[in-house]
């Protein structure tokens, strides 16, 4: 241990001298300096991790608790782990339980390394976190200098499992609000078999604050997603609303969307709610009906805003009469059917003032930017996991923290849960008791006048 500490300090000082000297000689700039420091700190990290793990293994070996329950079967079994610093190789001891005759590495159990695990958990959590915004290959590249396969990334995400929409608890008591807004939309995700699947998104919020001319911020928003049936997804939304809000005191609950049947399913789960047709989708249909007859567009909008159903349908009939193309006539009839089926939603859209719905932006930000904006094919499991992870993050969750908690829950109980203080103190004395950083063994450069700061630092930390 003392040798490793000396070597670490020597490497750090050698790197600093190299950077200073080469910069002064004109052979190194800030880019190369940062690269040199990164390489040095990675090497320091690997050495520290190796020393720490092997020190823990030595402590377990000398523990009275270990001697009582386990025989030493083998020593210095090698293991490698991919870390954020690179690949660390360390030795550990293999044991046999005296009573039940099982075999184990106590070091692995104590620090939480799973059998056959190639990537250490912290590095895994960073890869998962990166994968939310970039390809699996880039997620690895930004987490570790070691090459890790895409399949390993998939396996790591699969290990974490499906994040529930209820994973983040509701911290406050039931809130009283006058209005509640629920908006829903979907993303079309390309599958590996060439088909497209729908990924639904629903979010609940209390209102919006106008931050700038073109930007609104939703208040206390909560997202829900996943490869679920409409009934199951709306049931989760309803459970959240019942738990978070005092429903008896809410005057209006709006459910806004493009008129899809799965969105309207929510009306049966959220009491006293009313459907609002999304203005963005209504605009698409108005444009579709009047693209070749500009003179009808403004009158059609006027009749919609005045909630005059009779006049609206009459204008659409006029559009059909003025159209010669059979395909365009079919399109207008489709628009007519859409407006008739969603008339109540149109009335609610223009109830007092135009309802502002922002589903397109949320779909793009949370789902499309990762699931459908790039040419890739997903499995349904992978798409579901990714959608849930991104939604969890938008709800305020931390993926690395969540993964750590999952690891703790799944952690196999060690045969030795913790080491007694007496053994720990004894091992610390063996490793560090006589170590004096100011008098490091033949440490080059430290005695030189220009390293007065390092001697002062050593005395302070010692």
Image: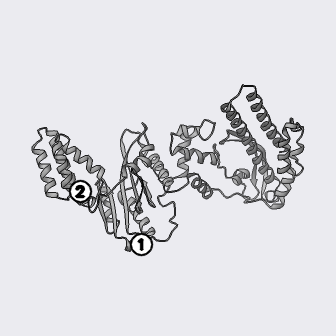
Residue 219 spot, x, y in % from top left? 44, 60
260 left or right of 136? Answer: left
For mark 1, give the secondary structure. loop
Q: Which mark is residue 246?
A: 1
The picture quadrant where one finds residue 98 is: bottom right
Observer able to see residue 78: no
Asked if 383 appears above or below 447 in the picture, the reply is: below
246 left or right of 5? Answer: left
How many numbered marks, from 0 up?
2
The picture quadrant where one finds residue 42 is: top right
Residue 194 spot, x, y in % from top left? 37, 38
* Residues tagged 1 and 2 counted as in contact (Cβ below 8 A): no
User: 86 or 59, which lies in front?
Assistant: 86
Q: Which residue is located at x 37 percent, y 60 percent? A: 182
Observer able to see residue 460: yes
393 left or right of 9? Answer: left
The picture quadrant where one finds residue 287 is: top left
User: 70 or 110, which lies in front?
Assistant: 110
Asked if 79 appears above or below 462 in the picture, the reply is: above
Badge 1 density bin: few <14, some 14–19, many ≥20, Cα 10 Å = some
Q: Which residue is located at x 36 percent, y 55 percent? A: 184
For mark 2, give the secondary structure. loop
391 left or right of 46? Answer: left
Badge 2 density bin: few <14, some 14–19, many ≥20, Cα 10 Å = some
Determine the CA span between mark 1 and mark 2.
29 Å
Q: Which residue is located at x 41 percent, y 60 percent? A: 204
Tag 2 residue = 342
Residue 337 spot, x, y in % from top left? 19, 52
């Amino acid at each position: 241990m003392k040798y490793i500490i000396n070597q670490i300090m020597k490497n750090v000082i050698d790197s600093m001298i190299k950077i200073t000297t080469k910069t002064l000689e004109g052979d190194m700039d800030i880019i190369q300096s940062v690269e040199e420091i990164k390489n040095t700190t990675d090497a320091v990290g690997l050495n520290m991790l190796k020393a720490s793990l092997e020190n823990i293994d030595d402590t377990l070996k000398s523990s009275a608790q270990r001697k009582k329950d386990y025989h030493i079967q083998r020593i210095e079994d090698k293991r490698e782990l991919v870390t954020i610093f690179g690949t660390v190789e360390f030795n550990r001891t293999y044991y046999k339980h005296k009573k039940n005759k099982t075999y184990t590495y106590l070091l692995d159990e104590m620090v939480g390394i799973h059998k056959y695990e190639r990537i250490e958990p912290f590095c895994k959590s960073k890869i998962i976190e990166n994968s939310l915004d970039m390809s699996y290959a880039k997620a690895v590249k930004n987490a570790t200098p070691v090459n890790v396969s895409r399949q390993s990334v998939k396996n790591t995400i699969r290990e974490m499992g499906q994040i529930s929409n209820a994973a983040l608890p509701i911290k406050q008591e039931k809130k009283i609000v006058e209005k509640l807004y629920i908006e829903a939309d979907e993303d079309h995700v390309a599958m590996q078999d060439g088909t497209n699947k729908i990924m639904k998104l629903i979010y609940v919020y209390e209102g919006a604050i106008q931050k700038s001319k073109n930007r609104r911020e939703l208040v206390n928003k909560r997202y829900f997603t996943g490869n679920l049936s409409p009934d199951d997804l709306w049931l989760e939304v309803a459970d959240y609303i019942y738990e978070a809000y005092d429903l008896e005191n809410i005057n209006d609950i709006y459910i806004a969307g493009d008129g899809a049947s799965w969105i309207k399913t929510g009306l049966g789960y959220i009491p006293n709610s009313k459907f609002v047709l999304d203005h963005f989708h209504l605009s698409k249909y108005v444009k579709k009906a009047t693209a070749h007859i500009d003179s009808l567009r403004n009158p059609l909008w006027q009749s919609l805003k005045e909630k005059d159903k009779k006049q609206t349908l009459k204008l659409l009939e006029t559009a059909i009469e003025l159209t010669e193309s059979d395909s365009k006539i079919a399109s207008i009839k489709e628009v007519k059917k859409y407006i008739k089926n969603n008339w109540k939603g149109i009335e609610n859209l223009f109830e007092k003032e135009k309802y502002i719905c922002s589903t397109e932006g949320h779909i793009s930000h949370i789902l499309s930017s990762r699931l459908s904006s790039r040419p890739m094919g997903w499995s349904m499991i992978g798409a579901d996991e990714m959608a849930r992870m991104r939604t969890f993050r938008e709800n305020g969750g931390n993926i690395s923290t969540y993964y750590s908690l999952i690891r703790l829950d799944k952690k196999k109980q060690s045969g030795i849960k913790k080491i007694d203080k007496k053994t720990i103190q004894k091992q610390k004395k063996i490793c560090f008791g006589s170590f004096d950083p100011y008098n490091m063994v033949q440490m080059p450069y430290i005695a030189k006048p220009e390293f007065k700061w390092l001697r002062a630092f050593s005395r302070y930390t010692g």
